Image (tube, helix red, strand yellow):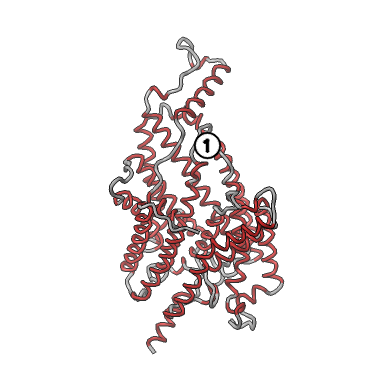
Amino acid sequence: MEEVSQEITKETFYSGHNGTSEFENYVLMGAYPSSLLLFSLLHLVFPISSYRKTFWTPFVWDFLLLVSPVILACTILSDYALVLLLVQLATSLVLILAVTLQDGNSKLFRYMRTFKHQVVEIDSHRHFLTHFRVCINIATVICILAVDFQVFPRRFAKAETYGRGFMDLGVGLFMIGNAVVAPEARGKASSMHHKRTLVLAVTDIFRTVISCSPLLILGVGRLLSLKTVDYHEHVSEYGVHWNFFFTLAAVRILVTIVFTVIPVSLSGALAIILTVCYQYLLNMYGLKDYILHGSDGKGSRSGILDANREGIYSCVGYSAIYLAGVSIGSFVFQKRSTIGDWMTCLLKLAFCNATLFLLSLTVCPKMDSVSRRLANLPYVVWVVTSFLSCLIVLLSLEMFVIFISSNRTLAKAGPGMVPRLPYGPSRSPLRRTRRERGLQDKNMDRNQSNHNTASGPPHPLIVAAISRNQLLNFLLANVLTGLVNIYVDTLSVTTMVGCAIVTAYTFVLCLIMVILHHNNISTKFW
């Protein structure tokens, strides 16, 4: 009787959620970028040298500044996430003023005038993409355990059918985060060769299946382990046998097959067509009722397709998200060398984001409500819009930190770094001719490019470590989550104990990734 009561309690705890507001999701998404800005500015004021004999100092520094705020925003400070965000931004503003006053602003405006012509390292590193993928990975591993505790607000959990839960958004962002760095997005797929042949197409599909084999193995392993230990499952999430590992693998393979026929340059258009057609089928041909209520209209689970209908059919929507990610990635990976080039890129991304945001406010509500379970058109638009918003913030942040860092370097460089002016001491700068002003500006641009390539502070250690072994981090997170649920009654512990367990678990995961990175170990061998 007690076991039945506990099972009912768990079922109630995990089901029936309706998500949270779009604004609160943006606040939670801002936890990492604001932490990154604060981290970068603190590094400029109090630089910590790279580890030599030990990695503990930078590791603890990174964990406290980058990971802890995300944990707090998702747990004990969830009701004050906006306050936490504003405090971080206010602290960053104070540091910006301190750095500016410390360096002096005599060269600031001169440097601003030539900054857009500055050669930057963004093109070779694209740290903003790495930060996006890592922050989604960090948020995911935190949420998949925290959701089992009372300290995690139920409004952040996945919505039952319709709603904007933070975990609903995280699933879509995880998918598009993989797409934006896919071989097709980076122009490295063999089928993108100018001579498209059947051999190249088969080669691409074979390589994709091999690269997805770990996901398929993990999916089967998760299925067997859950059935063996009788772990609580929310069937309406993906189905009886399906899970997100299968979705990741299925979407990747399906998109690769599509790209053997359709050029990657049309991925954006294909994403739009696929989303609209899928929504039409959902609304006009009863597909939505079937996915939500089963073949008998009462939630039946007879047969493989019926038992896993949510996971299987939602792959269509996730494929559209993936295609949109490839299209954005192809644009982002275009060659750019100066800050001006990246500013233009930023403006184009902002225009696309504004267009999608207006679409989500006007057209999407007339078609359906946001549903991660269906992966419908409003959900696809929501995910892509949120992705672009986060990408714009991270790219803007990277360029801003590069500007502050480079100006600080220029201010401390002394007279040797100051560009020579093309006019003599007898002529006042205010009375220069137009030709002389043009020569001076060109001279400054040339000197800036030759002597000072713009770059920001060093890459955080935890970010580099997780980026190196993201799939392993996700796998270990799932394993540790299962172990914690086996040995801890997650529903009965206090909020402080729950937060402590989530923090310790995240700390261990980050530490393992850093140790592997410190020893130059990469687990991706396929």
Res 435 seen here: yes
* Viewer-closest of 147 and 199: 199
Q: Is residue 138 above or below residue 340?
A: below
* Residue that numbered label 1 is attached to: 339
Image coordinates of residue 180 in percent, x first then y, are: 56, 53
Q: Residue at x 57, y 70 (%)?
A: 373
Quarter-wise, where is residue 274 in the image?
A: bottom right
- For the view shown, which residue lies furthest in the left direction? 53
Q: Residue furthest top?
A: 426
Callout 1 crowding tier (Cα within 10 Å): few <14, some 14–19, many ≥20:
many
Query: Camera-side residue: 169 or 468?
Result: 468
Q: Is residue 58 left or right of residue 340?
A: left
- Residue 415 position in % (x across, y down): 38, 22
Residue 350 showing in the rendered view: no
User: Of helix, strand and loop, which one carries label 1?
Assistant: helix
Q: Is 112 in front, or is 309?
A: 309
Give the amino acid type for the residue marked by disc 1 in the picture.
Ile
What residue is shown at x 36% (from left), y 29% (from top)?
Answer: 412
Q: Outermost residue toward the front?
A: 199
